[in-house]
Amino acid sequence: MLRFLVRRLALACLVALTVLSLSFALTRLAGDLAVAIAGPSATAADVAAVRTAYGLDRPVLVQFADWALRAAHGDFGQSFFFKEQVATLIADRLPITGTLGLTAIFIALAVSLPLGILAAVKQNTWIDRLATSIALFGQAMPTFWFGLLLMIVFGLRLGWLPISGTGSWRHYVMPGIVLAFTAIPALMRLTRTGMIEVLASDYIRTARAKGLRARAVVLHHALRNAAIPVVSIAAVQLGFMLGGSVVIEQVFALHGVGYLAWESISKNDYPVVQAVVLVLACIYVLLTLIADLLNAFLDPRLRTA
Amino acid sequence: MTDHALRSAFVLPRRLRNGGFVVGAAIVGCVIIAALVGPTLVPHDPFAQDLLNRLVPPMWMEGGSAAHVLGTDQVGRDYLARLVYGARISLLIGLSTVIVSGLIGTTLGVAGGFFGGRVDDVVTFIITCRLAVPLILVALAVVSIVGSSFFVVVMTLGLLLWERFAVVARATTAQVRNLDYVTAARAAGCSRGYILLREVLPNILNPLIVVATLEMALAILLEAALSFLGLGVPPPLPSWGLMIAEARDYMFFQAWVIVIPGLALLVFVLGINVLGDGLRDLLAPESRA
């Protein structure tokens, strides 16, 4: 177990380090960063001034080491546009994205677990086909378009929910549903195939043979084992959701990290962009780490990996 | 091509009873035809503005006319013409992205699965890192920094969407590697490159084709999302995502302006996915869940 723990932690650190380098490299794609920051109307003198002011005249490796060391301490520098500490900007907006992500994963699990279980128990019936169709549509639905449709129907026509902003829990319902649909297909398919596999196994037959009621067999015996992969995929999906929320935050004008990223991208605010990429990637790494540890805890066979 | 791949190609028509495959193939076929010959059939230019006929509704709605079957957009461009031209863009983006990502993913996956050991560790690590990178965010950032164009969008998506190819290629190659015909080829003195290209690759092709349909669908959705956020295919090219973005200001008054391009997107992607599912059942019936 200890060996597994150490290996897994080392891997997480290595991935985080790689992502750190990648997010630094991302902003160097522009070619000359000083020219990009100074803007199209800048003179050569302006560019030179920007270059010294932002330390861009130093060797790239020095710049990287400097940035990486600061970033490791949570100091991402100052935003060009907001004139604020990037770390503060992100910390202010992270709760909104977090709330959205958690709402979405909750909705996704609330839909896909029961549906997946029912589809597995009643294989090849209408409910199975319904579940499969929902998964197919969820996979093919353009999220931003789905969001706009919900806005028209529930926001404008029915007037049930607010169409933008973050004032109350009701603001999170529509974006939460939209974001949930990005995870529902994977979670539901996994629950379904997992349940089908487990229900066919010997110990379920034993449980049935000793006269347990069908409900007890499914919920107590089968679900417990089928849920193991679902737990880890749910964590992974939450990570994807936080990264993918940029589109939905823009549609619903939720001022979370995704919205901040979009604003910064359109304003060439590189320090914010690279910090958001890094933070979201690290959250993903952390989530998958937790999921793997949880899995190893639930299923001893995985500890040897 | 080996015997096996040849045979599966010829067996396909006989198994056409698979419903998903037929429906998917029909939808994708329609889009391909629309993309190829559509622009010549629609009597309007997708770029021609007509400010006197702005936001004309589709012909079946009140105020619509047969001159513009699907109506016109906010600057009076014919919606059907733009939709049909948009099919070309979605199709091209999807295909080109899959070629780029398929090459990257398959190369990495086959290398990892075939050589194992250190090589495999490195490949697995690269896949893990790729998964940690927030997809849409990085795509947006790259397109914004490098500048949006068709080529940049394809390269960006291609460089980001290869991981499923790699995962599947790695797993299937690891299975194939130890089969008798590979051992036989090795014993016959075939070179490593020959074995990889002529023995391994044809035998892992089927699952990769299925992955290709999934990735193509994903690439089309992502391009639409990028274009919707203003960082995809640059205007005035009529990408479906861009059409939705441009129509967004008018959607509360006339819902059809976003329903039409969105529906096109949904149906096309659904078709590709259903086709992929059908293909999987046809190519590997034993894996049906």
Image: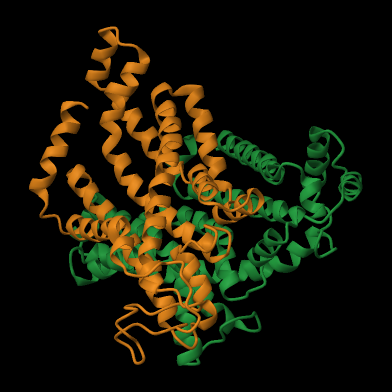
Chain colours: A green, B orange
Comparing B19 with A123, the one in front is B19
Residue at left 68%, top 53%? A279
User: In the rendering, at what x and y percent does residue A244 appear?
Assistant: 55, 60
Q: Is residue B185 visible?
A: yes
Of the 4 image quadrants, the one containing the N terminus of chain B is: top left
* Number of marks drawn: 0
Which quarter of the picture shows residue A120? bottom left
* Residue A221 appears in the figure: no
Q: Position of residue A209 (x, y in %)?
A: 18, 58
Image vertical order of residue B215 relative to residue A80, above or below: above
Q: Which quadrant holds residue A132?
A: bottom left
Is B250 in front, or is B181?
B250
In the rendering, at what x and y percent does residue A283 appear? 63, 54
Residue A92 position by quadrant:
bottom right
- Residue at 62% from the left image edge and 75% from the top image edge: A253
Q: Is residue B107 above or below residue A40?
A: above
**Residue placed farthest to the left in the image?**
B14
Q: Residue at x 71, y 51 (%)?
A: A274
**Is B122 placed left or right of A196 in the picture?**
right
